[in-house]
Image: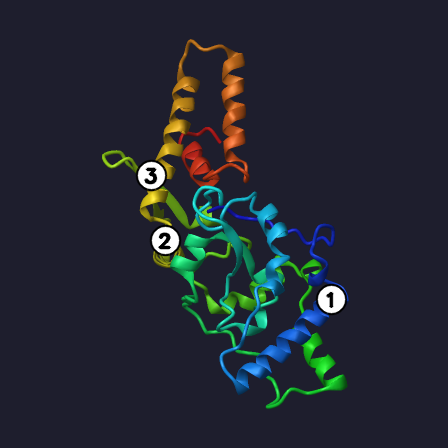
Amino acid sequence: MIRLARLRTATGLPRDFTGARLLEKHQDLVTRFFSGQVEPPIKWTSSKWKSAKKRLKFESSGKCAYCEASTDVVAHGDVEHFRPKSTYWWLAYDFDNYVFACQICNQIYKGDNFPISGQRLGSPALPNAQPAGAQLTQLVQGLVRDVTSTTDEELVALWGAEEADLIHPYLEDPSSLLTYEADEANREVWIRAGAGSRAARAHDAAVKFLGLNREELLRLRYAQLEILRVFKLSFDEPRISDGTKATIRAKFDEMSRPAYPFAGLNRFFLRQWNLM
């Protein structure tokens, strides 16, 4: 897992996630909430967040934001609600609550799980029945947060007291919480916890609720490490030319970029080898 950057510009943002159409979307959210109180649970329609997929996929370079494998390899990717909409209904249409995740991490492992070590966020205060007119407009406006006018710092202040065990890849740096360990005998690379209690919680949640040490990922990560080691062996060879060394270093730079599969693993071992 690597730190991702949220694009907070209107360019490329689905039109229904900004301006008047975002207000309309949240009016639908309020209607669904009150309908769900009469006939629970709340009935969701994936078409309401489907338009976010292209932007999210671009932000994560086509990789799952959690396991970092290409979604063409592990499973199709889709819009994942970091805080599950079953509990955090008011964040169902919040763009900052979305990540691009593969179906295995999202559906098979995470589902509606969201472990925390702090105090659970409280639901917005709402009247007993759905209001109308100006009162409805005021209620809807209170729920809307436009991704183009929000900062990461505001989100940390808003959500941080929950102390979510899972890493939010847009708001935390996974490299400070997770490490990698090669098991040579079994040809696997395991994700391990970094130092400190936050790292231990992040690791345990990532393994249990995202499956980041599932068998296919252990093997895929080891295959990536083998490629990285071949380049290192060549780089360390004293007889190679300066030009070849420069080419290999450029390859290291490429393998460290966000778009490269398992960039977090690549960065970890390159740092260990003092090559980054």
**Label 1: how many Cα within 10 Å (few below 14, some 14–19, many 20+):** few
**Which of the two labelled residues, at mark 2 and mark 1, occupies the earlier sequence position?**
1
Q: Which residue is mark 3?
A: 219
Q: Which residue is mark 1?
A: 21
Residues at marks 3 and 1, CA–CA distance in whole angstroms: 45 Å
The residue lying toward the viewer, choosing from 272 and 251, is: 251
Secondary structure beneath label 3 = helix
Check if mark 2's residue and mark 3's residue have beta carbons within 8 Å. no
Q: Is residue 33 above or below residue 111?
A: below
What residue is shown at x 61% (from left), y 67% (from top)?
93
Q: Residue 255: image x %, image y %? A: 50, 32
Q: Which residue is mark 2?
A: 211
What residue is shown at x 54% (from left), y 55% (from top)?
99
Residue 149's image quarter?
A: bottom right
**Label 3: how many Cα within 10 Å (few below 14, some 14–19, many 20+):** some
Secondary structure beneath label 2 = loop
Check if mark 2's residue and mark 1's residue have beta carbons within 8 Å. no
Q: Is residue 77 above or below residue 144?
A: above
Inspect the image, locate mark 3, and give the three-letter code of the amino acid beneath it.
Answer: Arg
What residue is shown at x 68% (from left), y 70% (from top)?
25
Residues at marks 2 and 3, CA–CA distance in whole angstroms: 14 Å
Count of numbered tags: 3
Q: Residue 113: image x %, image y %? A: 41, 66
Secondary structure beneath label 1 = helix
Q: Nearer the viewer, mark 2 or mark 1?
A: 1
What residue is shown at x 40% (from left), y 66% (from top)?
115
